[in-house]
Image: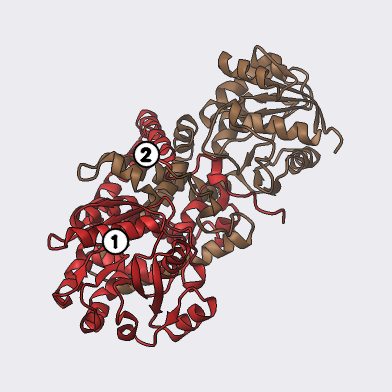
Chain colours: A red, B brown
Amino acid sequence: MSAMFERLALIGLGLIGSSIAHATRRAGLANEIVGYARSPETRETAAKLGFLDRVADTAEEAVKGADCVILCVPVGAIGAVTEQIATSLAQGTILSDVGSVKASVIAQALPHMPDHAHLIPAHPLAGTEQSGPESGFAELFDNRWCIITPLPTNPPEQVARIRAFWEGLGSQVDTMDAAHHDQVLAVTSHIPHLIAYSIVGTASDLETVTKSEVVKYSASGFRDFTRIAASDPTMWRDVFLHNKEATLEVLGRVTEDLFALQRAIRWGDGDTLFKRFSETRAIRRGIVEAGQDTAHPNFGRGKPPKS
Amino acid sequence: MSAMFERLALIGLGLIGSSIAHATRRAGLANEIVGYARSPETRETAAKLGFLDRVADTAEEAVKGADCVILCVPVGAIGAVTEQIATSLAQGTILSDVGSVKASVIAQALPHMPDHAHLIPAHPLAGTEQSGPESGFAELFDNRWCIITPLPTNPPEQVARIRAFWEGLGSQVDTMDAAHHDQVLAVTSHIPHLIAYSIVGTASDLETVTKSEVVKYSASGFRDFTRIAASDPTMWRDVFLHNKEATLEVLGRVTEDLFALQRAIRWGDGDTLFKRFSETRAIRRGIVEAGQDTAHPNFGRGKPPKS
């Protein structure tokens, strides 16, 4: 693919920022990739790993002359970062992001946007439980969805550019409005993470079962929860602070349904349990058929080495 | 390894029963493996797949002359099956099982046990989300834990035999009392499964987000829950009916902790969220270090094919 951007600027160089750099380079989507991270250690690591053409000393310097800027920072930092770089954005620049919440990103960034630049929010549904500049890799977005939530004021040709960029990174792209995005992600991502964090915390705090027993016998189900509960705490704190309404709504439904199962257990109502447990296989099948997970048992994970 | 049993009888030929047959044969632990399943289709499939030396027409016939009998049936069927085979058990036979709940297994089976046989309950912490005789494989128990919950009346040399058998199948073996087993498994297995079943059900029932959106965007967290929510409904119904107290106790703690996080979201208490989200990484590390899960990001699962 020929370069779509003369200069791509990445603000934030964690798992997502560094992966965008790797994938941009893989596809030759930008002639120059400039990056900035707030922490000097991260900038140093990024320089050492070499996935950028240039590491800038400030965010303002990084975005200067860039025709596309992507904010890869926790959702809670979007407002401040946008304010900081706003006057340095070049004429016609696309300012995008990768935040897991979209209405709040728009609310935070829009007031600072200069008229000559385009705020086009995006969210790649991709990640791992690891974080930091060392954790990025070029294949992260391959066949994963990226959801763009354009503003009514966005010129269609600019939306098309950012769509083509994400397709170039390996993603499939959908567009929807920000409020609906936040509802969808509350269900498919935010609440699953909250519940995983919660139950892993609960299991560590019990008196009757020791933490070492939980670890030792985790392969019977628990371990699956610990993977997503190992995700970046700052990122996830910001998700819940910035998608409050949708996550509280879904969480209310989750606890309501959980109470129904609790009641079925208490009253020995096997029919209710069986019915609920039978309905869920179809969803799994659908996900595997949609190419969004492996059909191999146990995620096909390698058997752990003999100890 | 030389044969430990002259004749091993397996009652129930699903994922676990068939895997025991494969692994027994791999290690040469029995001179003859006989099996029985209630459903004629399962018996037929087992005969076709050839993982048994002989398929019996009745449970009584299967256990005749066996020096070890393992019940691989849902926990709720243990009492009836034990009653059915009790008078056919040979002198000195070990009767064991693979149930996920142990106190109930003992309570169901013990009243039917003849004096000349030994009830030694066991629980291999191994499985996949698949079920049926086609889903078994010899490596299922490799490096997984098997928990034996011996009775005070068990002769130590018979407990040692069943321990050596499970080690021969590839497992590491622990012993503990049945009540503690049921508490430990409530945390590490039963409640994680219940929550996965529940949240997958909740997500399918929402009005604001369609089922196809849930499937499509599941890679952002949700898909991990769907794997264990695809497990066998009969088996899991029985688990909750037969481990009522321990699962209700842990479930109470889970919802309590979930409400604390809900409150933190509602009040914008980022410190509480961050603190909870930071505590859980250590558990994940411990599980990986204990060899109970892969260290590869995303469980190292293969990237799904391009659609």
Rendered image quadrant of residue A67:
bottom left
Could you tell me residue A16's position as x and y percent?
41, 66
Left or right: where does residue A288 sit relative to residue A103?
right
- In screen coordinates, is B125 left or right of B238? right
What residue is drawn where x is 68% and y is 14%?
A: B56
The chain letter under disc 2 is A
Residue at left offset 70%, top offset 47%: B173
For residue A307, side relative to residue A255 (left or right): right
- Report in which chain the residue with disc 1 lies: A
Is there any visible trace of residue B299 in the rendered image? yes
Quadrant where the C terminus of chain A is found in the figure: bottom right
* Picture disc at residue A162: 1
Percent x, y of residue B307: 42, 42
- Which residue extends farthest right? B2
Which residue is denoted by mark 2 in the rendering?
Answer: A266
Q: Are marks 2 and 1 in contact (CB under 8 Å)?
A: no
* Circle 2: residue type: Arg
Residue type indicated by callout 1:
Ile
Q: Is residue B195 above or below residue B36?
A: below
Labels 2 and 1: the sequence-earlier one: 1
Q: Is residue A83 above or below residue B226?
A: below
When the figure is inspected, residue B115 is found, relative to residue B215, above or below; the finding is: above
User: In which quadrant of the rendered view does residue A241 lie?
Assistant: bottom left
**Which residue does the image show at 26% across and 74% down from the upper left?**
A78
Apparent side of residue A271 relative to residue A159 in the rendered image (left or right)? right
Q: Nearer the viewer, residue A288 or B243?
A: A288
